[in-house]
Image (cartoon, rainbow, N blue to C red):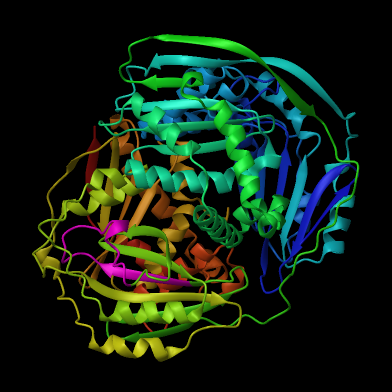
């Protein structure tokens, strides 16, 4: 990786051999805060830009923040010129697209508001900054979005004349990228003069009631921090120490957040538990003041190292990894550095200086006091900095390994994106009658590993664990194969609601309850394991031998499955449709899933259709395996009146897929990571794709793959509607 300045613009370039896909990140100085446009314009303009450009051979994602807007282009090895030569940043805003995206953003706001904690924290920001600058909402509310017009959006386009930074990670050589940048229109506009201006702002103190329409217990406190990006690494280490203290002494009742912006930071402490009280915050602050021990410091530093490994395993988050050059200071940090940061922050977060938001308070009073802030406008570094990190040497990709033994599978592959070992475990929870939660993963399997995430796919729970060496993972697999997933313990009280943190998780947790099936046994079953290792280090079949001793779960016949619960209580209004899939090719079920969110514009995605119709912001889907049958469901959050229309949109989409079936099969073979593992852009994507291939396909991947007949059979199947209502 090399970092340099070209014509006063910051560029990071990292060559990563072994991949056939890379990422280009271009950032512009238009965010939600202090940039002279109405609330919501920066985010609205991001939507308009993404919708205007048909990025045919790659994928475009974007993110609006409070200080800037970030665009991420996933491009193939031979398609890098597209980003630099063919993109027009000074777009013409079409009125039809404007109204389409206005509806999309309104639906996005509804999904954001499903979690009332999001709304409470945003309101806390609003109060702290007196509704200005960093108190402004990134996404806006429905009223603000309704008022934004073409003129306001065109005003925002002025901020697209000069990127603040460009970051490139992929198989390309540095000189090649520099040439493309020099020839592009990114350098078309002259740089403004660098300067720093000092302004006054007001920061809130006191306490206020949570708005009545936010239906959740909430206690929160917020403080302004006079720190900037240069303090990021100190703040992260300190936060890790403080998180451990809060978890140990206050049972995780409160969540601590530190957000650092261009000219300051914000620290918040909040809780949504009914037993939380405002007076608890004073005790927590006293706990944070205690001197830092060497043990705390070392644990926090290790956690930070793990986090950077995790960031580096995804191309988009790796941008953050290479942008934050302070990672090179990790080995130089001392406990004295962190103690200095602690003392600086503690002075600013005294209990008396806080701004509090609660359901019930004694003194409804917020007062604002002035502070000065220094805002850097078009400030450019005047030196060229080159930092060299170790890069991967050229290596050939190893083909994925897949072994099947009756109903069990083992898959393995390597990747240049990781220095760790990843193990994904698929557990069939049908016999338990519910999905597993993170804390139920057996501790003996996690002794030397880190639980990265938990995903849900129908009745299956998928745990992903990472290790720093092969020996640790081998030990974990031995325990895994010996474990019996008998988890129905009378003393174990499970609060499922606690884990329903977003639309996707809640919908997947609740949808399996509509399937009525006979009890199998009071246990879960290991279905298969998938492994991703560092480059050229695939683990062989030796771990698969003990699979033969595993008990095969009893099969469920088609006649034993009924769906009779058509209305589900939830935190939102929505609708889901469920249909059984043809048996002829489980691989086609994977193709169907991918086309719902596909990155190719030669056929419509289901997500794009529901956005165009104004039904919802995004869809949730999942496959559900019951015996020899596979079901699929698609669900959206929407107004109740759109229930019938959603079913019509799904049928319209399926007819389009039947017409484009040949090109879809070709597209799938090119993009599915099992066929082309060098095209993956994250470890989570790679392990997911090879795991699904192991579970849903037979040993011959091409067996009976006829997508058109597969879709036609789906169209002849009965569709079952399930309504979500709050």
Q: How many marks?
A: 0
Above or below residue 140? Residue 482 is below
Which residue is rendered at x = 42% and y = 71% of the image?
A: 448
Where residue 277 sits in the image (x, y, percent)?
A: 31, 27
Which residue is rendered at x = 44% and y = 54% of the image?
A: 596
Above or below residue 536? Residue 210 is above
> Does residue 405 appear left or right of residue 557 in this picture?
right
Which image quarter: residue 347?
A: top right
Where residue 100 sits in the image (x, y, percent)?
A: 53, 31
Viewer-side residue, 228 vs 637? 228
Where residue 379 sits in the image (x, y, percent)?
A: 83, 33
Above or below residue 591? Residue 31 is above
Question: Image quadrant for the C terminus?
Answer: top left
Is 433 inside the magenta-drawn segment?
yes
Which residue is rendered at x = 24% and y = 58% of the image?
A: 435
Question: Image quadrant for the N terminus?
Answer: bottom right
Is 145 inside the magenta-drawn segment?
no
Which image quarter: residue 192?
A: top right
Which residue is rendered at x = 30% and y = 88% of the image?
A: 546
Viewer-side residue, 439 vs 620? 439
Viewer-side residue, 193 vs 723? 193
> Does residue 268 appear left or right of residue 581 in this picture?
right
Tell me which segment is drawn in magenta: 422-444
Above or below residue 514? Residue 580 is below
């Amino acid at each position: 990786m090399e970092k340099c300045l070209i014509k006063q613009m910051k560029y990071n370039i990292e060559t990563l051999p072994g991949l056939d896909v890379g990422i280009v990140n271009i950032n512009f100085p238009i965010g939600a805060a202090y940039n002279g446009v109405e609330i919501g314009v920066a985010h609205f303009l991001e939507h308009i830009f993404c919708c205007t450009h048909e990025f045919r051979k790659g994928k475009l994602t974007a993110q609006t923040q409070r200080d800037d807007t970030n665009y991420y282009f996933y491009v193939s090895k031979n398609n890098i010129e597209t980003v630099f030569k063919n993109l027009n940043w000074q777009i013409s805003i079409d009125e039809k697209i404007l109204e389409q995206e206005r509806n999309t953003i309104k639906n996005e706001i509804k999904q954001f508001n499903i979690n009332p904690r999001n709304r409470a924290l945003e309101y806390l920001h609003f109060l702290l900054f007196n509704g200005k600058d960093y108190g402004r909402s990134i996404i806006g509310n429905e009223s603000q979005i309704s008022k934004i017009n073409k003129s306001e959006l065109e005003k925002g386009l002025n901020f697209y004349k000069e990127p603040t930074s460009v970051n490139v990670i992929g198989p390309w050589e540095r000189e090649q990228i520099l040439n493309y940048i020099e020839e592009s229109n990114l350098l078309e506009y002259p740089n403004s003069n660098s300067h720093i201006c000092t302004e006054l702002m007001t920061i809130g103190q006191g306490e206020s009631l949570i708005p009545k329409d936010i239906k959740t217990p909430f206690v929160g406190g917020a403080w302004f921090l006079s720190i900037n990006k240069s303090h990021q690494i100190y703040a992260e280490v300190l936060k890790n120490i403080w998180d451990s203290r809060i978890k140990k002494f206050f049972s995780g009742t409160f969540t601590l957040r530190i957000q650092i912006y261009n000219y300051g930071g914000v620290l918040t402490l909040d809780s949504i538990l009914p037993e939380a009280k405002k007076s608890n915050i004073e005790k927590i602050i006293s706990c944070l003041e205690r001197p830092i021990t060497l043990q705390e410091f070392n644990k926090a530093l290790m956690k930070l190292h793990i986090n950077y490994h995790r960031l580096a395993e995804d191309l988009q988050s790796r941008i953050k990894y290479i942008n934050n050059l302070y990672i090179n200071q990790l080995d130089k940090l001392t406990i004295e550095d962190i103690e200095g940061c602690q003392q600086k922050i503690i002075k600013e977060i005294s209990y008396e200086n806080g701004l509090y938001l609660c359901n019930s308070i004694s003194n409804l009073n917020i007062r604002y006091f002035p502070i000065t802030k220094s805002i850097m406008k078009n400030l450019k570094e005047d030196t060229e900095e080159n930092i060299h990190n170790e890069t991967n040497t050229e290596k050939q990709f190893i083909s994925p390994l897949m072994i099947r033994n009756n109903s069990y599978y083992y898959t393995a592959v390597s990747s240049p994106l990781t220095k760790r070992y990843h193990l994904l475990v698929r557990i069939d929870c049908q016999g338990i009658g519910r999905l597993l939660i993170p804390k139920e993963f057996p501790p003996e399997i996690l002794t030397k590993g880190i639980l990265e995430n938990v995903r849900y796919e129908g009745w299956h729970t998928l745990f992903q664990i990472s290790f720093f060496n092969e020996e640790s993972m081998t030990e974990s697999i031995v325990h895994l194969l010996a474990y019996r997933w008998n988890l129905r313990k009378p003393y174990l009280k499970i609060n499922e609601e606690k884990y329903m943190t977003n639309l996707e998780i809640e919908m997947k947790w609740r949808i399996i309850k509509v399937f009525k099936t006979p009890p199998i046994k009071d246990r879960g079953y290991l279905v298969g394991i998938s492994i991703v290792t560092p480059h050229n280090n695939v683990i062989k079949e030796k771990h698969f031998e003990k699979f033969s001793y595993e008990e095969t779960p009893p099969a469920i016949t088609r006649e034993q499955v009924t769906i009779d619960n058509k209305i589900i209580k939830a935190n939102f209004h929505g609708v889901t449709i469920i249909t059984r899939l043809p048996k002829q090719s489980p691989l086609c079920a994977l193709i169907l899933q991918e086309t719902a969110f596909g990155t190719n514009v030669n056929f419509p995605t289901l997500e794009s259709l529901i956005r165009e119709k104004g039904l919802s912001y995004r869809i949730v889907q999942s496959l559900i395996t019951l015996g020899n049958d596979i079901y699929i469901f698609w669900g959206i959050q929407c107004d109740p009146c759109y229930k019938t229309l959603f079913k019509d949109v799904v049928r319209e989409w399926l007819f389009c897929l039947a017409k484009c079936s040949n090109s879809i099969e070709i597209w799938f073979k090119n993009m599915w990571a099992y066929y082309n593992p060098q095209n993956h852009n994250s470890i989570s994507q790679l392990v997911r794709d090879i795991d699904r291939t192991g579970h849903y396909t037979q040993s011959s991947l091409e067996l009976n793959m006829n997508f058109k007949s597969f879709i036609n059979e789906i169209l002849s199947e009965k569709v079952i509607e399930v309504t979500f209502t709050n």
